[in-house]
Image (spheres, rainbow, N blue to C red):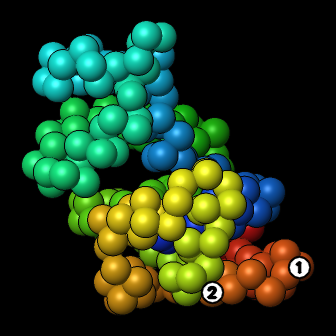
Amino acid sequence: MQRLGLTGGIGSGKSTVANLLRGHGASVIDADAISRSTTGAGGSAIARITQCFGEEFVTKDGALDRDRMRQATFADPKVRERLEAIIHPLVGQESARQEAQAVAAGVRSIVFDIPLLVESRRWRQRVDAVLVVDCVRAMQIERVMARSGLDKDAVERIIDSQASRGERLRSADMVLFNGGSSMSALITEVDQLVQRFGL
């Protein structure tokens, strides 16, 4: 059993790499998807978020108001810390449940897709190796603007709130550079990588 930590900055192409690894038979545990489910309508974090931040941070359908929360976390880093204190334990519990399920099923490799792996520190001890999907900042900005509709300033604030490119690269056991040359080039890189993990 191999446990691989997969991370990368927003817009790096990390989710694309995760899907390619899934296609090779890895069991992918997506921390971002788990986090979104806890803050979606009726999610397990909503009651605590309402209690901690107020009803104005929850939409009419019972989900986290992401735009309002994004603005609040940019204005005050302590807001982010309080939010993470609510969400991270829930993500950890569900990740552990999915990991146990994958182990019981006898899968050969588990990929933990963790956007904030470097920032959280605690994940490093749970994986055998860290794969960083890397790209230049201009490419990150271009990709996120194209898919999200956010303006450049908003995207840059998100990038600046994450670990720096240098910090991620220093934490890596392996680096996959996703410069956007072609999808086939990325597929070839992933094909070469998976041989190291018995996939």
Horizontal and vertical percent position of residue 145: 61, 62
Q: Residue at x 52, y 60 (%)?
A: 151
Q: Which element carries disc 2, helix, strand or loop?
A: strand
**Residue to which mark 2 is pinned:** 177
Residue ID at (13%, 24%): 52
**Could one spot residue 14 in this view of the protein?**
no
Of the image marks 2 and 1, the number of the one nearer the N terminus: 2
Q: Amino acid at mark 1?
A: Ser
Give the CA distance from mark 2 to mark 1.
13 Å
Residue 77 lies left or right of residue 58; in this view the side is: left
In the picture as drawn, the residue positioned furthest to the left comes out as: 78
Q: Is residue 155 above or below residue 90?
A: below
Residue that protrudes farthest toward the right in the picture: 184
The percent coordinates of residue 84 (x first, y second) are 23, 43
Q: State the image coordinates of residue 174 (x, y, percent, origin top left).
A: 52, 85
The residue singled out by tag 1 in the image is 184
Q: Is residue 29 above or below residue 196?
A: above
Q: Quadrant of the C terminus?
A: bottom right
> In the figure, is residue 171 to the left or right of 194?
left
Looking at the image, which residue is at 30% across and 65% down? Answer: 161
